[in-house]
Image (cartoon, rainbow, N blue to C red):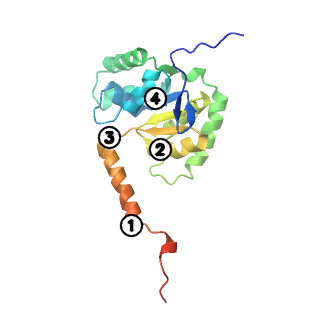
Amino acid sequence: MQKKKKMFGFGKVIINNKPITRIGLDSGVLVALIDNNQEYNLKRPEFFIKKGICYIYQLVVNQAIGVLIYKRKYPKEKAIQETLNFLDENNILLLREEKIDTDKRNKILNDLKSQRNKLKVIPKPEDSDLDIISSYKCEGIDCIITTNYKHFIELGNYLGIRIERIETEKQRDRRESDKIMREFFWRPKKNFKKFK
């Protein structure tokens, strides 16, 4: 029996006692990496990229190129070239849409659309977010790294995909202060005494 050759990876990474062998990147993360955005803490995605276990869905690449052109004001040719060069130099494998099992993806996508209606997060995840999660699930992605954590976390949990956030220091500080405020002001009902 032939041994399977690992293309670029060194195996797997263990996070919270769960093996992670395939990481999917979201467009915000890809843009931050290409644009070398120092506001974001990029150590986590860079660590996984060095391990050689990162993948990216074709739609994510297209979204990232669009952001570089329309929001970061890159010339079109430069945005395309920088993106493709970054993927190639870092051995990030492209998951092409035509290679993904369409029936399986559509089944997962339709399931996620019904789950989206149950979510309390506002605004709710867009169809493109659902397409990304569905496609990554079809391709056996264990973990998605995103800047759009709120749109991915509940649906990722539903599908059994770990969601990792990257954020700016300002976003992290705001999230931590919100948590402290919730813990300070929220009291379980059992602690309140009834007054007669």
Q: Which residue is mark 3?
A: 168
* Cα distance between the residues tagged 3 and 1: 26 Å
Mark 3 vs mark 1, foreground winner is 1
* Cα distance between the residues tagged 1 and 4: 40 Å
As drawn, 92 above or below 141: above
Percent position of residue 95, x then y: 53, 22
Q: Nearer the viewer, residue 162 or 108?
A: 162
Mark 2 vs mark 1, foreground winner is 1
Around disc 2, counting alpha carbons within 10 Å, would you say few (fewer than 14), some (14 to 19), or many (20 or more)? many
Q: Which residue is mark 1?
A: 185
Residue at 50% over, 54% down: 120
* Cα distance between the residues tagged 4 and 2: 15 Å
Q: Nearer the viewer, residue 183 or 104?
A: 183
Q: Which residue is mark 2?
A: 151
* Cα distance between the residues tagged 3 and 4: 21 Å
Q: Which numbered disc, 3 or 1, marks the residue that appears first in the sequence?
A: 3
Around disc 1, counting alpha carbons within 10 Å, would you say few (fewer than 14), some (14 to 19), or many (20 or more)? few
Q: Which numbered disc, 3 or 4, marks the residue that appears first in the sequence?
A: 4
Q: Secondary structure at mark 4?
A: helix
Amino acid under disc 1 = Phe
Residue at 48% over, 80% down: 193
What is the quadrant of residue 4 in the picture? top right
Q: Which numbered disc, 4 or 2, marks the residue that appears first in the sequence?
A: 4
Mark count = 4
Q: In the drawing, does residue 130 fall left or right of residue 73? A: right
Around disc 3, counting alpha carbons within 10 Å, would you say few (fewer than 14), some (14 to 19), or many (20 or more)? some
Amino acid under disc 4 = Val
Residue 60 - label:
4
> In the image as oriented, which residue stretches furthest toward the top?
2
Q: Which numbered disc, 2 or 1, marks the residue that appears first in the sequence?
A: 2
Mark 3 vs mark 4, foreground winner is 3
